[in-house]
Image: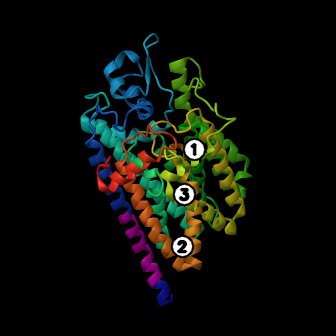
């Protein structure tokens, strides 16, 4: 073995150790930050992180382990604290939530840790300890998703660590993913983000060799969980299968692939089907009632993309890079570029057609969080191309993107949870940016 090869062999495990150390330090810092930030918000304050929609996802855990999903075991005061994210059917003695249980399944390990700390059954499952456990879990899923995504892309499009660092910063802080890990940990979005990252990692983990059975099952269960978490994210699951078919055509041509997918889907769906049968007397239920895609004929496309009230781009400025990323990916793999473009077109139309396009109290277009990993592929392609061919442009972009990410990070910390202004009213948006750096707005 040549001396240079021996040095490279020694450097590789050292590099991996430093990578794991950086991941652990990053995760620990934001776990501490999330717990410290959210603990300052009283549990009876409307801004606490398990209120409203979040409580509708979380209720499966205390509902199952403490209340038996029985309405008689839940006080009216708990509903008030939870922001009415679930309802009580007092006649049939059922806890009713329109949200799915897949996010709660991912929260479960951290819920059990809280129970072990508090003592089993001592609290009602809504204690400060339970909040802190879910907050820690969301940060772990978010940071692990970021790491898996970077590892997946570096296997497919090898690049310098500088590309990986800037990529992680862009996805973590240049979009709204941080907000839904740090400020809204009981919503579904950070868990769906993690699952899409897992599926993409499974596609590329064995790049250059045959796909291992473990990677195949990881991909199938991640896709099934994505759909179980939010059924409209069937678009994401189909895009993931399309990505697998392009990158590994042999996998989707195997008859066993579809049988395995059906098995994974049924296994993942079983808890939800059981709950629906228990709560509603039917195996399959459309739990959203009158809510639907009522704006299909006049979708709010401009608002979804650019409105200061929860529009996508003002709250995820790194996504302004996507047209350039599309060009960079087009040079490498046109079919993947077209696949991502088609998925974005479909899902953005679905947001714009939803009866409440702004999705209530949100930071940006929150249902796009789980599509950020696809956007990440475009951003990675752009950064990799620039570093390889135009380093001055790369470093100029790195400086400006770092500034943009920092500003957006500060804005996410400052945001109070709701923008109730006009759709195109820029004053609340500008006020939030001002107060993130300079304190109280002067008027």
Image location (x, y in percent) of residue 306:
55, 49
Residue 159 appears in which quarter of the rendering? bottom right
SS class, disc 1:
helix
Residue 347: percent from left, percent from top:
63, 44
Considering depth in this image, is 201 or 27 the residue closer to the camera? Answer: 27
Q: Marks 1 and 3: CB-CB under 8 Å? A: no
Mark 2 or mark 1, earlier in chain: 2
Q: Which residues are magenta?
A: 7-22
User: Is the C-beta separation of discs 2 and 1 under 8 Å?
Assistant: no
Above or below 169: residue 426: above
Q: On residue 319, which mark appears?
A: 3
The Cα atoms of the two marked residues, 2 and 1, are separated by: 36 Å
The residue at the point 33 percent across, 27 percent down is: 81
Q: Is residue 205 left or right of residue 8?
A: right
- Give the residue at mark 1: 303
**Image vertical order of residue 3 relative to residue 57, above or below:** below
Secondary structure beneath dot 3 equals helix
The disc at residue 431 is none
Residue hosting label 2: 159
Residue at mark 1 to residue at mark 3: CA–CA distance: 16 Å
Helix, strand or loop at label 2? It is loop
Circle 2 crowding by C-alpha within 10 Å: few under 14, some 14–19, many from 20: some
Q: Position of residue 114 (x, y in %)?
A: 30, 38
Real-space Cα distance between discs 2 and 3? Answer: 21 Å
Does 99 sit above or below residue 38? above
């Amino acid at each position: 073995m040549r001396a240079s090869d021996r040095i490279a062999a020694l450097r590789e495990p050292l590099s991996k150790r430093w990578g794991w150390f950086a991941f652990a330090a990053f995760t620990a810092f934001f776990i501490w930050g999330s717990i410290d930030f959210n603990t300052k918000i009283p549990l009876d304050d409307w801004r606490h992180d398990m209120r409203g929609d979040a409580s509708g996802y979380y209720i499966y855990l205390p509902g199952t382990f403490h209340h038996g999903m029985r309405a008689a075991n839940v006080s009216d005061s708990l509903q008030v604290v939870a922001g009415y994210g679930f309802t009580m059917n007092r006649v049939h003695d059922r806890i009713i939530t329109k949200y799915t249980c897949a996010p709660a399944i991912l929260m479960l390990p951290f819920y059990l840790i809280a129970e072990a700390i508090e003592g089993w059954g001592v609290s009602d499952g809504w204690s400060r300890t339970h909040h802190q456990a879910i907050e820690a879990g969301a940060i772990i899923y978010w940071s692990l998703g970021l790491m898996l995504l970077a590892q997946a892309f570096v296997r497919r499009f090898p690049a310098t660590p500088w590309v990986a660092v800037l990529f992680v910063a862009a996805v973590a802080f240049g979009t709204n993913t941080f907000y839904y890990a740090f400020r809204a940990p009981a919503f579904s979005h950070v868990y769906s983000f993690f699952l899409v990252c897992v599926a993409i990692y499974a596609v590329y983990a064995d790049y250059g060799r045959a796909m291992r059975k473990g990677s195949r099952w990881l991909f199938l269960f991640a896709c099934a969980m994505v759909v179980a978490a939010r059924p409209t994210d069937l678009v994401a699951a189909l895009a993931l299968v399309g990505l697998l078919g392009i990158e590994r055509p042999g996998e989707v041509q195997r008859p066993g692939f579809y049988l395995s997918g059906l098995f994974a889907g049924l296994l993942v769906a079983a808890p939800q089907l059981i709950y629906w049968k228990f709560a509603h007397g039917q195996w399959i239920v459309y739990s959203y009632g009158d809510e639907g895609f009522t704006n299909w004929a006049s979708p709010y496309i401009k608002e979804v993309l650019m409105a200061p009230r929860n529009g996508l781009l003002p709250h995820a400025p790194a996504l302004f890079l996507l047209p350039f990323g599309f060009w960079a990916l087009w040079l490498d793999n046109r079919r993947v570029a077209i696949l991502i473009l088609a998925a974005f077109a479909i899902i953005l139309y679905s947001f714009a057609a939803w009866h409440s396009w702004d999705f209530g109290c949100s930071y940006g277009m929150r249902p796009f969080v789980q599509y950020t990993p696809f956007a990440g592929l475009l951003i990675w392609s752009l950064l990799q191309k620039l570093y390889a061919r135009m380093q001055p442009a790369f470093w100029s972009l790195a400086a400006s993107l770092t500034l943009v990410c920092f500003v957006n990070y500060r804005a996410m910390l400052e945001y109070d949870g709701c923008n109730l202004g006009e759709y195109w009213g820029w004053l609340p948006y500008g006020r939030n940016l001002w107060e993130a750096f300079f304190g109280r707005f002067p008027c």
